[in-house]
Image (cartoon, grey):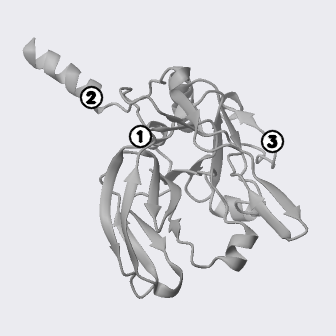
Amino acid sequence: MKILMFLIVLVAFSLPTLARPADSCLKMVLPNDYHEESNELGSWSEGSYNPDSVLFDRCEYSPTYLNIFAKKYYSVALPPNYYPFEPMINYLEEKGVDDISNNYPEFKAQCQQIQQELGTMYFTRRPPFMCDASDGDILRSPYLIIYFENYQNVDSTIQLLNNTIESATDVIYYYRAMTPLSVEENKYDNSKPHVYPNPATDYIDIAVAGNRSINDVVNVYDVLGNVVLSTSAGTPSEGGHIRLDVSGLAAGVYFVRVGGKMYDFVKM
């Protein structure tokens, strides 16, 4: 009996965290309010992009604290010539699990299993802004974009898709929330550092124009304003950037302060 109970606990802890936090815990990663402004002195851009209304869990004692939640833009790559819809999905067209061809019974059964756990899911074609491929190109390297009717924990959903869809060769999530650098900033203030890659997994590079030395301490903050990482900036490398190891941070939204400026990034 003790062995059986231990196995049950072990399995429970090995499963991905699929529970959704309370609505009061979820907040937009960034507002979707990007717009252009102009006056007699010139033009500039303000605001940020969040076209998919990506959320994060801001409740410190939640089991999914700082996790990202999203409905759309999960991408599943499949083996060559393995395309489970007949005919192929057109751009702006959505298909459901019941529309999967009966010639792919394993794929259909696995998607039905995912739908039972996560709720209604849809499939569509990758839009042209991601990859404007022909039908022949898609058959040679098939992929599907998956949307969900409800918000899902991004990390747990990627894990579930990977573990359940046996034919999947790769599963990724397209994070499209960002604060673009305005044209005016690019033109007139090349001294501003910026952070990449964003989202990040193991590290971020803080790019500094002109390889200039930054005497400040670089601090990384969580969404509650707590310092979770701190280091001396020092002199940028030959490539003009400062590399910061963020592999030890939990997935979520963070802010890095360097050179008197604050920049946001997402740790996946």
User: Label 1 belongs to which residue?
Assistant: 163
User: Label 2 belongs to which residue?
Assistant: 13
Nearer the N terminus, badge 3 or badge 1? Answer: 3
Q: Indicate which disc residue 136 carries.
A: none
Furthest residue to the left? 2
Furthest residue to the front? 40
Furthest residue to the right? 40
Q: Where is the N terminus found, in terms of image quarters? A: top left
Q: Residues within 10 Å of mark 1 (few under 14, many from 20)?
A: few
User: Label 3 belongs to which residue?
Assistant: 93
What number of labels is visible?
Answer: 3
Front: mark 2 or 1? 2
Q: Disc 3 and disc 1: Cα gap in Å?
A: 27 Å
Query: The residue tagged with tag 3: helix, strand or loop?
Result: loop
Nearer the N terminus, badge 2 or badge 1? Answer: 2
Q: Quadrant of residue 146?
A: top right
Where is residue 192 shown, x and y percent of the image? 57, 72
Q: Quadrant of residue 101?
A: top right
Q: Residues within 10 Å of mark 3 (few under 14, many from 20)?
A: few
186 horizontally vs 166: left or right? right
Query: The residue tagged with tag 2: helix, strand or loop?
Result: helix
Q: Amino acid at mark 3?
A: Glu
Where is residue 17 shown, x and y percent of the image? 39, 30
Name which residue lies at 67% across and 43% down.
31
